[in-house]
Amino acid sequence: MAGRYPPTMRLIHLTLITLAAVLMGCGSDDDPGSAANAPTSVTSEPSAVTHEASTTAADGSGDTGSGDDGSGGDGSGDVTEKSGAPTVPDSVAGSEGSVATPLLDNAMAELEVPLGESLTPETVSNLFPWPADFPPTEGLIVGTQRSWERDHDSVEENRRIGIDEAATAQSLDAYSETIEAGGVWSRASTQRQSFLTDLYTNDAGDRIVLSSKTELEPGVAGLTYELEPAAPDALTPPEWVGALPAPNGGELVEWVEGVGPVQDAFSAGDPAGYVSIRIRYDDQDREPLVEHLQEVLGSAGFTVTDTMTLDSWTADVTTDGWSGQVYVGEWSSGEDTGQDVVWALSRTT
């Protein structure tokens, strides 16, 4: 694996940031326009997102890290305990195969339900609420994605739908007339260069981004809808999050799950399915985190095929029908620093 860098294309939050930056340069959404009708809320009231996970030690001993040695039950001795951090479930110890695989496959099966259908609130109701006052374009759903991210006190939720029908600048302009005629959504900004993007807002502060490319590439959706609710739902992390090994003491700050070519207009994603999580550790050295992962990956059902250590640590891993990377690297924000543990997996069957 010499010369390879961490899998940034699979760390899906980076593409979310890129798309947001492009849209910010397109224009302001401070004036969403007048609304003849009252806006329809697309979210429920937000509340704290928590992740309850087993704190049983990876060796199945039942040590929850409550002893005086401050080990956190993970064998590293230096990872501080913090409630709500994903860790290896007790069912992992001594198991054959990965405990994560059935949970990952179940998530993909749920995401696949709307595929081949037209976009309506009913066809995606098993995944998330969708505004009935935003009529869809022609075309069938080819991909779905859900993501959640916490940045300090800010929480962002994204719901994405990929449509097979390609868009043009002319078709998006005509479509805008239909959307704005409803009196609820207003087009706040537009880009018509190599990327075609339209940002719509309503009085509730919800945002919908339509994105496409002037020249489509294989495996990229013809048109992507991205809904960013102003008040994110109180989303409980999917079950598979707690089945991906990570040391105690971290904070889950991001999770993504998707299937089909719907990542965004900039990249295709993995049609068979993909997941990623990011767990943040404050004021933490890398070595105990890496040591913990090296100890538990095998018992969690993952085979390590290659590793690389430069300014970060990356391991290529495989399990039943899934492959990808687990990564440990530094993060910083002002004077605050620490380490991130990132999992990024794609379905191979």
Image (cartoon, rainbow, N blue to C red):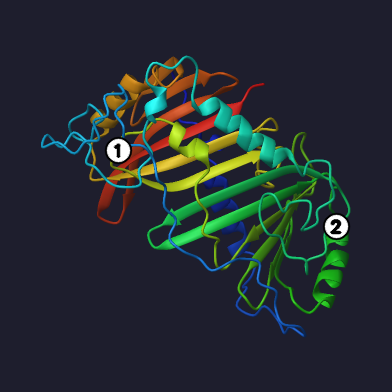
Q: Which mark is residue 305?
A: none
Which element type, helix, strand or loop, lies under badge 1? loop
Relative to 197, residue 319 above or below: above
Cα distance, mark 2 to mark 1?
46 Å
Nearer mark to the viewer, of 2 and 1: 1
Q: Residue at x 56, y 36 (%)?
A: 275
Relative to 245, residue 339 above or below: below
Quadrant housing residue 39: bottom right
Q: Tell me the residue that label 1 is attached to.
A: 248
Q: Which mark is residue 137?
A: 2
Relative to 180, residue 155 above or below: above
Can I make out residue 14 in this image? yes
Q: For the residue carrying disc 1, how many other residues have a C-alpha within 10 Å: few (<14), some (14-19), or many (20+)?
A: many
Percent across and percent down for residue 64 are 25, 35
Which residue sits furthest left? 68
Left or right side of 305 for 259 = right
Relative to 244, residue 122 above or below: below
Left or right side of 62 for 162 = right
Percent across and percent down for residue 81 are 24, 42
Q: Residue at x 74, y 83 (%)?
A: 35
Percent across and percent down for residue 32 are 67, 78
Q: Amino acid at mark 1?
A: Asn
Quadrant housing residue 65: top left
Percent across and percent down for residue 185 are 74, 73
Q: Quadrant of the C terminus?
A: top right
